[in-house]
Image: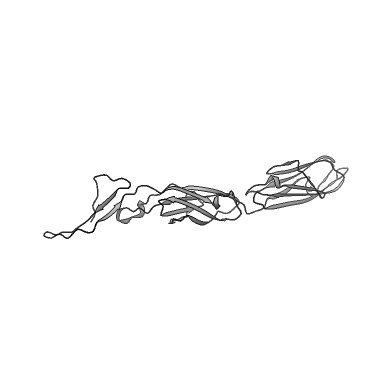
Amino acid sequence: LSYTISSPSLTHGDTVYWQVRARNSTTSTNYSSILSFTIDTQAPTSQSISIKDGDLYTTSRTVSLTLSATGADYMMISNNEDFSGASWISYTTTKSWTLATGDGTKNVYFKTKDSSVGDQGSTDYANIANSINDSIILDETAPTVTPQSPSSGSSITTTTNLAIRATLSDSGSGINTSEVTMIIDGSQVTPTQVTSSLARYVMPTISTGSHYVNVTATDNVGFTSYSNWTFTVTTSSVA
C-alpha cells in the first residue's frame, strides 16, 4: 500500500506527520501512532580535507587525514579523481591514509553524503556533495648528483677559468639550493652558481696533476646525496 503526496508541494526541511488505520466494509481500526518524516534535499556542506595537518612535504606514504563536513553520514576517499575502486564508509573526522606510490605531488580526493532515503527506504536518494581534494609532496628518496664537467676520469688541458659542474635532480621535494656544497682537492669552495638542477664553480687557475671533486646536495626534507670524482690536468692533450 502506498500513497503519493501531491499537494501541497514539499521543500527541504518540511516535516510530514501521518497516521494510518484499516477498515473493512463494516469496521475500522483505531489510528496508528503518529509517524513522521522530514524532507532532506541538501547535500552535506562545509567539507574540508587536510593531509598531514597541511604540511607541504611528507617522507612517508602513510599520512593522517583531517576531515570535516556538516550533515555527513558517509564519506568516500580516493587517490583517484574518479574515485575508481573506492567505496562509502562511515564518516569520521580523522583517517589514516596511504598515498599513491612514487615521489612527487599526491592528491587525495574526498566527498560525503547523508543518509536520506527514498521510496521504501532506498539509499539511492542520499544527497551527495561535490568532491574536494588536498595535495602534498611525497619524497622518499635522496637527490641525485651527477658529475658533468670535467667528466670523471677525464684528462684536460685547461688551466684557467675552469668550470667544474655537477647536475642535480630530485623528483620529490626538490633541491635545497642553500644546502649544496662543493669541495675541491679537500677545500670547501663557495659555488659560483647553484640552481635546482646545477652546481658550478669556476676556478681562476688550476695546477697540472690529479684533482678531486665532491659535490653534496640536500633536498627540502633533509635527504642528502653526493658524488665524488677525479680528473687530471695535463700540459698537452692525450692522444
What residue sits 77% from the left and 42% below the top? 201
Residue 45 vs 87, above or below: the answer is: above
Location of residue 114 in the rendering, given as x and y in whole percent from the top left corner: 39, 52
Tell me if 220 is positioned left or right of 135 in this view.
right
Location of residue 235 in the rendering, given as x and y in whole percent from the top left corner: 88, 43
What coloring was used for the rendering? Answer: one colour
Quadrant position of the N terminus in the picture: bottom left
Q: Tell me how many marks there are.
A: 0
Q: Nearer the viewer, residue 21 or 161?
A: 21
Q: Residue furthest left?
A: 26
Location of residue 55 in the rendering, given as x and y in whole percent from the top left corner: 57, 50
Location of residue 171 in the rendering, given as x and y in whole percent from the top left corner: 63, 48
Q: Nearer the viewer, residue 110 or 234?
A: 110
Q: Residue furthest right?
A: 235
What residue sits 46% from the left and 51% below the top? 68
What residue sits 45% from the left and 53% below the top? 76
Residue 33 falls in image quadrant: bottom left
What residue sits 52% from the left and 54% below the top? 65
Quadrant position of the C terminus in the picture: top right
Q: Nearer the viewer, residue 165 or 48?
A: 48
Q: Nearer the viewer, residue 31 or 141?
A: 31
